[in-house]
DNA sequence: TATTGTTATACTCTATAACTATA
DNA sequence: TATAGTTATAGAGTATAACAATA
């Protein structure tokens, strides 16, 4: 085997791994999406936004939320509009910067989210039920490496 | 700790793992999508459809393609229409069943795909470059378990 | 009756870019 | 000038369901 062939030799392994990552994620994600729709008439981005807020009672600025959710700002505005209209989140002025807003869960939003989150967690546990606690940990660590490396090698900007 | 608390005790691990899976996949997927757009003016589903066909020179029926791509039939028709209009795939009648069609890559499509696939593979290798060959293998195996378990516990139908 | 593929539709999610109001 | 958030737009991606032709 010459140098160049060797250079590309086992790249098929990475490709196979990527395709499997995609398949697993899509399988689970599709199920979560349809259950969120059926059970709670909501969507994954809406659930995701609420999940982000749930950890930070004082609220979160749009910019931060946008980065966390990995989508651009306009989208966060749209989802926030929906949830605010339903009384699940509220926009709160930020002292000292009149441009900024904190988005936070309302008490009603917190209650609704708690119900959804409980069931959501069960779906996940069920989906990942084929793994031992040790395997879950191993996967978590290895994907941590992937995440770190990908973020590090970001194509600039982001 | 009582029984019920123990029952739910380490479910947080599964949830954390799921969120990390989602993050990793989205990070890489977003990058792939934007590069496919910039470099080849195409989309992930279009690339995916061609990738499925590339392995099967004689072509693949719409139904099979639909299952492989994990989307419903109407979408496959749409993407196929686009690619056929560009001369990258063709619809071929199936002997013995006049309802069915085989979709296959044209020689032009095969050529175009080869170019894209080469670059695409490099993107993936780059994204997963933080892992050793051994870690790639471990991840692949563990995700294989996940995939198997999820498919097994399918909510019927599919 | 069931299956294959198509059509029509509607909705969610998304990025982009122009815009405003503050800083 | 730069930043925070909004608005407007266009397109990707998807599921659903009714449909025609064939099995």
Image (cartoon, coloured by chain):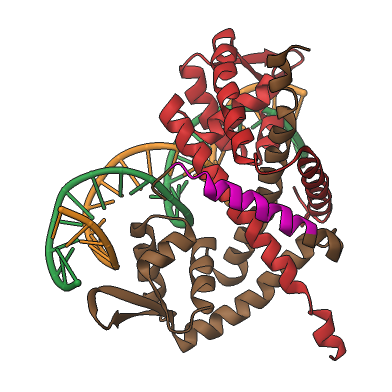
Chain colours: A red, B brown, C orange, D green
- Which residue lies at the image location 79% right of the left edge and 12% below the top edge? B1
Residue at image coords 51%, 22%: A83
Q: Residue B39: say if magenta.
A: no
Closer to us: B3 or A84: B3
Taking the spot 77% from the left edge, 47% from the top edge, the residue there is A139
Q: Is residue A100 visible?
A: no
Depth check: A74 or A33 in front? Answer: A33
Q: Is residue B139 left or right of residue A109?
A: right
* B95 relative to B131 in the view: left or right: left
x, y percentage for residue B130? 85, 58
**Residue most extreme to the top:** A107
- Provide residue B103's location: percent of width, then percent of height: 38, 76
Residue B96 image point, x, y percent: 24, 81
Q: Is residue A88 above or below residue B86?
A: above
Marks counted in the figure total 0
User: Where's the N terminus of chain A, which quadrant?
Assistant: bottom right
Residue, far bottom:
A2
Q: Is residue B154 left or right of residue B137?
A: left
- Main structural element of the magenta stretch: helix, strand or loop? helix
Residue depicted at x 56% and y 29%: A47
Taking the image as shown, residue A132 lies to the left or right of residue D13, namely right
Q: Residue furthest front?
A: B3
Can residue A17 be seen from the camera position used here? yes
Q: Eyeballing the image, is A88 above or below D6?
A: above
- What range of the chain is rendered magenta? B138-155
- State the image quarter where residue B18 is shown: top right
Residue A33 % position (x, y): 49, 38
Residue B136, by quadrant, is bottom right
Q: Decide which of B7, B24 is in the foreground and name it.
A: B7
As drawn, A29 above or below C1: above
């Amino acid at each position: 085997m010459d140098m160049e062939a060797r250079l590309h030799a086992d790249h098929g392994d990475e490709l196979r791994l990527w395709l499997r990552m995609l398949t697993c994620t899509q399988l689970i994600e599709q199920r979560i999406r349809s259950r969120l729709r059926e059970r709670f008439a909501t969507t994954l981005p809406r659930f995701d936004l609420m999940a982000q807020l749930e950890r930070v009672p004082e609220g979160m600025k749009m910019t931060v939320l946008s980065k966390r959710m990995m989508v651009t700002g306009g989208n966060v505005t749209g989802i926030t509009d929906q949830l605010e209209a339903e009384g699940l989140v509220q926009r709160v002025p930020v002292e000292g910067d009149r441009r900024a807003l904190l988005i936070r869960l309302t008490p009603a939003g917190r209650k609704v989210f708690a119900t959804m989150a409980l069931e959501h967690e069960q779906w996940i546990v069920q989906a990942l039920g084929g793994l031992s606690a040790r395997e879950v940990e191993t996967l978590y660590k290895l994907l941590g490496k992937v995440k770190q490396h990908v973020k590090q090698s970001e194509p600039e900007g982001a």
